[in-house]
Every structure is written in C-alpha cells, then in structure tokens.
Image (tube, helix red, strand yellow):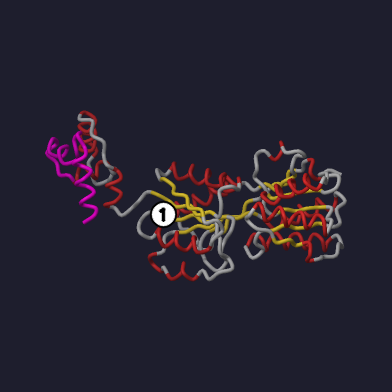
Amino acid sequence: MLLEIYLCFTELQMDRINIKKLAEELNLSKSTVSRAFRDNDDIKADTKARILAKAKELNYQPNHYASNLREQKSRTIAIIVPELANNYFSQAIHGIERIAREHNYHILIYVTDDDYQKEVDFIRHLHNGRADGIIMSASGEANNHSYLNKLGGKRLPLVFFDRVYEDIDVPRVVTNDYDSSFKATEHLILQGCEKIAYLVVNKSLSIGKTRMQGYIDALEKYRIKFDDRYIVDCSNSYEENDVIVKEVLKDLKPDGIFASVERLAFATYYACYDLKLEIPKDLKVISFSSLEIAPLLNPSLTTITQPATDIGGQAAQLLFNLLEGEQVVSTIQEVVLKSKLFIRNSTNK
C-alpha cells in the first residue's frame, strides 16, 4: 500500500512523461517498457532499442528508486564502524564505496562509538529493507552475539572487517595482527627498549587480544620479563587517556610505548610534551596507524600501517559476491592482508 502511494505521488509530481504515457506512445505494456529499462533478456533487441529511442525522444527518465522498491531491493549497503575519527576507518569506507559504486550501489554509514547496544539497534533497524547487506567492524565482542543467528533466514548478508566475532560464521577481511605486533615490539627491543608499555583500548576485542599476544611473545623471545602493569587499559576519551598515559609515564617510567591504536600515540605525544619528555631520546613510540600525516609529526611517527583501503575493497567484494551470486562464498572465508612497518624518527636510537 505504501509503495502504491509513493508511486502515485511520484508520478503526480512529475511534469515530464511517465512510464504509463511512454508505454501508450509505443503501444506496449508498462511491464514490457519497465523490463527494457532493467535490461531483461526476455525483451527482443529491436523492441528494446525502440523503447530506449522513444524515451530519449520524449526525455523520459526511469524512476530507478521506485523500481528498486518493487523488487524489494534498496541498492544500498550499510557500513557499521566503531568510529570515524580513526583514519583507518575513513580509508576502509573509501575502499568500500569505490566497489559499491562499481556495482551501482550507495552506502549508508552507521557509527557505534564502540557501543554494543547501538550495534544491535542498527542491525535490527536495517532489516526493514533499508539495506541489502552489511559490512561491519564489531564493537561488542564481550557480549552475546546470538541475536545475529536468531535472525535466521531474515539475516542480511554480512561481512566483517578488522574487528570480528569469532562465533559468527560469516566472511571476514583481517590483517596479520599477531605478526605485526610481534615485529613492532621486536623493533622497540632492538632499538634498546627494555620497559615497553602496551596501550590498548579494549583487550577483549579480537584485535586487542591478538596484538597483545604478539607483544607478549616478542618479550619472551628476547627474555624480557613480562609485567602486567605495562599492559595499560585506556579509553575512547582523549581527556581520560591524557590522565592515564601521564600516570604511566610518571609511575612506571617506560622507555618504549607500543600504542595499539593511533589515538593512543597522540595521547603519548601530548603527555610527553606536557611532562617535558623527549621522543625518541627519553621514550620511543610506535603505533598501529593509517595516518597519512605520520611522517609530518614531530618527531615522525613509526607505524604499523594496515592496507585500510584494500581491506574495505575486499570486504565489499565479498559482500557483492554474496548479493549477486557470482560465485560461492564460504560462510567462514577469511582474507588476511599484510600490514607494513614504517620506521621513522620516533623510534630512533
């Protein structure tokens, strides 16, 4: 009923010719004309050409949105991310949008602020037909994710990237976080660091646990005793992180900081400035970061940089493989991409 009201309203609003008038001009049915614009194979080539020529002559523009409503397709995909301030997610979204555009799809962006309930509400909201599929970086790993499975046959095609739920069997695109974290810690050790603090926002997340294990194993390889005081729980608040990092620098006096996300590297830079500590003389800093201006910081920041745009693009391609049925996608298919270590002045000897 709502669809009929919408279509009637749309046609009343249009001063130009509509599909009914075009069909009358051609002495064809509306459905034949509509199938021609959808490029259906059951329309003869000469008939299709005649329809398109008449449409051009009369300056008719097909209402693709109404057509999508009839087919129960939105031609939209939803992207759910924990935040936008992190340059990584902005780049990943750019990669997703590029692939979506190639498939003539639009994107909707939902930001959870790492709030699990927001994530649940967003996904339930999206099952009203607002999107045809979802690409998500998870927020609530410590919570119960069974609501995704309870959606059953109604579940929209879903692909994870970066942060995943291990108990939900859907395709995902991740990076080699363990190896990257191990190499980052190893780099600090080889630069002379013996008291390395690992700053993390949420160590219960898949990436938090994996990165932390790489840090711990690197310490073990070089026979540096692990001290859990150097695993520092931080937050999403810049004000709170400023207090936390300053306390760590004053009380534990680390000679190296390994930031699991770029906002914690920023917090470290600010704290060092206020405490009159010099990077890298007094403290060496390395961070996971896709920040394009990392080489321009003072000192330039050593980073483990994920291929964020490629991650987004591959996640989108997995989703469109599901949506368009061009190939079979295993429900547990995992694509693992490699991050790169860029050594800059913040870890110089």
Magenta stretch: dominant SS? helix
Name the image quarter holding the N terminus: bottom left
In reply to whether residue 170 is colored magenta, the answer given is no
Question: In screen coordinates, is 294 left or right of 159?
Answer: right
Question: In screen coordinates, is 201 left or right of 300?
Answer: left
Q: Residue at (59%, 68%) from the top-left corner?
A: 142
Q: Which residues are magenta?
A: 1-30
Give neighbour class at mark 1: few <14, some 14-19, many 20+ (Cα, 10 Å).
some
Residue type (three-letter) at the residue carrying disc 1: Leu
Name the image quarter holding the C terminus: top right
Q: Residue at (87%, 63%) from the top-left corner?
A: 223
* Element carrying mark 1: helix
- Residue 213 is drawn in which quadrant? bottom right
In reply to whether residue 3 is colored magenta, the answer given is yes
Q: Nearer the viewer, residue 225 or 311?
A: 225
Q: Residue at (46%, 67%) from the top-left corner?
A: 148
Whole-percent x, y for residue 322 in the image: 44, 56
- According to the image, label 1 marks what residue? 323
